[in-house]
Amino acid sequence: MKMEKMDNMEKLIVEFEVEKEVWNKYGIQEKYLLHNKKRIPYKAIVRDDNLLAIVSRKYKLIPNEDVIKIVAKWCDDHDLLYKIFSTDTRVHILCSKDGKGIIVHNSIDATFALRVDLLHKVKDGYAIFRMPNLQTVYRRHTKNILEIVAALPRMLTEIYSRTKEYESWLKKLETKMLTDDFVQSLRDEGLPKKLLKGIVLMNLYRTRPTLRDVYEIISARIWNADVDMRTKCQYFKILNDLMLIEVEWSDIT
């Protein structure tokens, strides 16, 4: 290990040895690491000789390509259109019909678990909503790979079947009006100011907007924000959690 100064920043250089390589698919390798010839609890994810991430040895790599194949077939079987957004390490697959559907997330660098959320068209974007009390659609990459992949079509069907419940919840939001307290909650929970622009003024209208109006405006802004999908999902979680305080999921069941 050595340290260097570069542009007034400290740079730490560490060398590892490779104990073994256990994966070679889609140009991806998992290299189990040693340091000073001693086993350490980490491995490197490498594609085409480029380091993508260093993760726990317990991390089970699920290739994005495999997830895409499964989801694409499922969409074809259920007459849904799909669109793929991807980076070097992450994939997000939108599956929808008539503005309703699901979005599937996965990564090969531990930044996203295999996850399925509801998706709903709002204005010029989409809202992402994670179903309460439905943990079967959220899989950390620490389980048996074959079991996880085999369960994915069932997971997709299960969450897609809940789209009507989500619509009912959205309709319940129409019965609640925007309040000063809710505006303050949006501020307090840390949503960026640019996402809330104009919301305070809306609360001064003679006819106050409903929570659904506000939900759709902010959701569209989140969807179109110049941030990565992980950050968008964090913003959606804040927004959805606040809305669920006002209209609980149990109110529609």
Image (tube, rainbow, N blue to C red):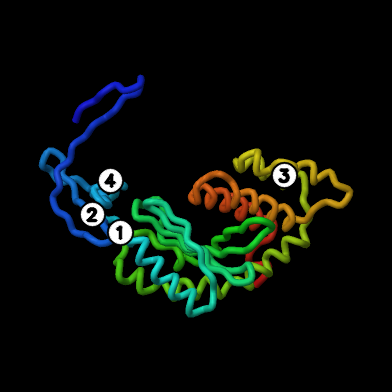
Q: Which amino acid is tagged 3?
A: Val
Label 4 residue SS:
strand
Is the C-beta separation of discs 1 and 2 under 8 Å? yes
Residue 159 lies, in percent from the top left, at 52, 71
Is the C-beta separation of discs 3 and 1 under 8 Å? no
Residue on which disc 2 sits: 30
Q: Which amino acid is tagged 1?
A: Leu
Image point (56%, 44%), residue name: 226
Residue on which disc 4 sits: 51
Q: Alpha carbon of mark 3 to alpha carbon of mark 2: how far?
A: 47 Å
The tag on residue 183 is 3
- Tell me the mark number nearer the camera, choosing from 2 and 4: 4
Q: Please state which of residues 131 and 219 is positioned toward the viewer in this rendering.
A: 219
The tag on residue 61 is 1
Image point (17%, 40%), residue name: 16
The answer to which of marks 2 and 4 sits earlier in the sequence is 2
Label 2 residue SS:
strand
